[in-house]
Amino acid sequence: MDPLVADRMAQAMREAWGNASSVHHFGQQAKAALDRARGSLATLIGAEASDIIFTAGGTESDNLAIRGAAESLEPAGRKHLITSAIEHEAVLTTMKALGKRGWRVTTLPVGATGVVSVDRLRDAMTDDTALVSVMHANNEIGTIQPIAELAAVAHEHGALFHTDAVQSAGKIAIDVCALGVDMLSVAGHKFYGPKGSGALWIKRGVRLVSTITGGRQERSRRAGTENVPALVGLGVAAEVAVRKTATDGARLSALRDRLEAGILSSITGTERNGAATPRVPNTANISIDGVEAESLLIGLDLAGIAVSSGSACSSGSLEPSHVLKAMGLPHARTLGSIRFSLGTANTDADIDRVLDALPPIVDKLRSLTTAGGRK
Amino acid sequence: MSGGVDSSVAAALLAEQGHDVIGVSMQLYDNSQVTESGQRAFGTCCTIDDLYDARRVAATIGIPHYIVNFESQFGEHVISNFVREYVAGRTPIPCSHCNSDLKFAELLDRARAYDAERLATGHYARIERDAAGRYHLHRGADNSKDQTYFLFSLTQQQLSCASFPVGHLDKDTVREHARRLHLHVTQKPDSQEICFVPDGDYPTFVEKQAPGAIRPGTVVDHNGRVLGTHGGVHRFTIGQRKGLGLSSTEPLYVLEIKPDAAQVVVGSRDALGRTRLTASGVNWISGVAPTDWMRVAAQIRHRHSAAPARVRRTDEERVELEFDAPQTAMTPGQAVVFYEGDEVLGGGWIE
């Protein structure tokens, strides 16, 4: 978390503790804090503040966009939904749930590059397609999808277009008008804001059915007393991102490229997963032959290096990554893939440390695998 | 770290002594797996809760904690062996296979890859190293909790990197340590059943796992006279009295299981006693088998009092063993473990 975010959140907890819906002075202070945050986030994504609905995170934003649009367009006879095979679970599981309740769901495949094809979407569109939801940047491999082209195709058939921009907001420049989308999800903790803060931008005129019903907060689209400190944090994070995105992005992608090139050249049997460009600057996904990601994660963590596999869940089950699977990677390679996510605090020295620590750990784990076959 | 009190205290004591401890829990089966009929494949055991318990204990102690996924290895080494043995009319001990083929094999290898010097567990057993540098395995100080019966297959090499921090304690003391160290599992009950069959219904588990291998057959007396029918030899173990589905004036016990003929032979209790057995897959802890008959105390079940016997090697990995007095219900698939005092000399699988 950005230190400025933490400071302003603490300040908001002390000073803006009123209920933003209250008429009195304290309520007004809270409301003013929310208004400012809404304006800051609007600047980050090139939107009008009044079109932003605050939520408790990316997953909730995705649910509101998909369930809200599906239900809203159901009376018009549009019961077809389209998404891609590499979406975040927040989208995929929601689509699946709607599929069980009578909607037709088409899941677009991706090739080895991890990019959704515009032609595939064109083929999948029908007259009763209600909504197309394709993520802006993938969370496991970082590839950026051709959102503007995809949205144009959806609109040709009168369908709405939603994009989950949780991985891209704050990392690359975003302009909702240039993207041409109808809804866009963001999450605060992906750009140094707090967890449990998020937003859905909804283009003016797009009607949604609320998923959380109750009071009239957020223009009656998301009921419940606003979590003021978290949303203040989201706003401050957006302000910081607006200042830093351009310079930090270039610096991070240079570090990321050096890390990637270093690993690919120093360890045999390694490959980058997904297209190199266009990609968000912080993500590198690499498969390492003959090693299970799970073992590698532990070895790296013990060496003070925190990475993810994008596949293991908290219960320790070994589900292969649905993203890598959708890209057609063989099962063994999906289990041997790890994801490095760089952040603003990372330096050249960090990259050197990883490049020093990784090869011996891989060697040790590989020697175990080859020593296998015990009785 | 299973999430139980023994391994939790083992980890906590090591950390307290200043060791650099890494907590590891093994995920052994997918508890959320649901069969096509909608039933849970592995019962409703609280495994996920156990992993959470381990994680919470690690956080209390202040050590890192990882869950390693050994589902495929557990299925391959332990569950498939368990099913195969029951189908073949034997009564397996999955805990022994889990110790020798997973914990002190795959998990130990992992530990080495992370530069750990030792693998510590919560077993009630003690390891001693003599002046010549050889390792000896002794029963846990708490004889009622002793687990050496499940550890007979450990080798010198495995013992050299193993550590049993609660082996010299009794259970009450272990719980006392848990309380002192503020571990929330202090009052957690001991696990009783085989972990992947929490309801203890082994026949149903075997039927679900290997439906094609189940063959009904007959229950006969020692003369081959048919007394009844049964749903498969996997439903029986030597010495079993309940669930035979027979009405008889005198109590009948399973004396022998003939898997090829799908026959279960029953008879009176006095016919259950035997003095001789042979065992295969024999391990001698010292690494050296005796060259001639050797006096030992032999134990043929987890809950059997080791009885005087003599044992002799017959080939590379087999022995014959003769008890001084007849022992009830020698059961193929179970282990026979040889002791001298409280030291484990070795053991093997009853044939």
Image: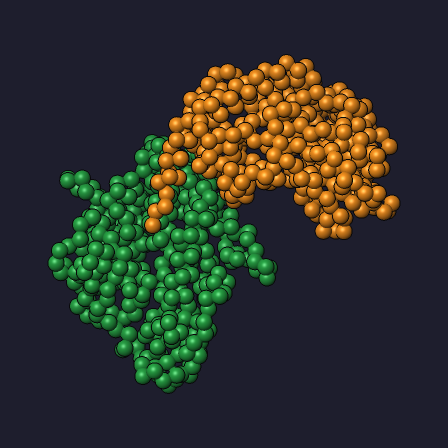
Q: Is residue A357 left or right of residue A112?
A: left
Q: Is residue B127 left or right of residue B194?
A: left
Q: Residue at 50% across / 63% down in the picture?
A: B208
Q: Residue at 49% across / 65% down in the picture?
A: B211
Image quadrant assignment for residue A59: top right
Q: Quadrant of the N terminus of chain B?
A: top left
Would residue B117 be visible to someone looking at this image? yes
Image quadrant assignment for residue A341: top right
In the displayed image of the protein, which residue is found farthest to the left?
B292
Q: Nearer the viewer, residue A264 or A16?
A: A264
Q: Which chain is green?
A: B
x then y, percent, for residue B222: 31, 81
Q: Residue at 42% across / 68% down in the picture?
A: B234
Q: Is residue A309 above or below residue B326?
A: above
x then y, percent, for residue A19: 75, 30
x then y, percent, for residue B308: 18, 63
Q: Quadrant of the C terminus of chain B?
A: bottom left
Would residue A9 be visible to someone looking at this image? no
Q: Is residue B263 above or below residue B96?
A: below
Count the marks.
0
x then y, percent, for residue A154: 80, 35
Q: Looking at the image, what colour scheme do you see?
A: by chain
Q: Is residue A239 above or below residue A304?
A: above
Q: Residue at 60% across / 25% down in the picture?
A: A276
Q: Which chain is orange?
A: A
Q: Nearer the viewer, residue B59 or B322?
A: B322
Q: Is residue B320 left or right of residue A86?
A: left
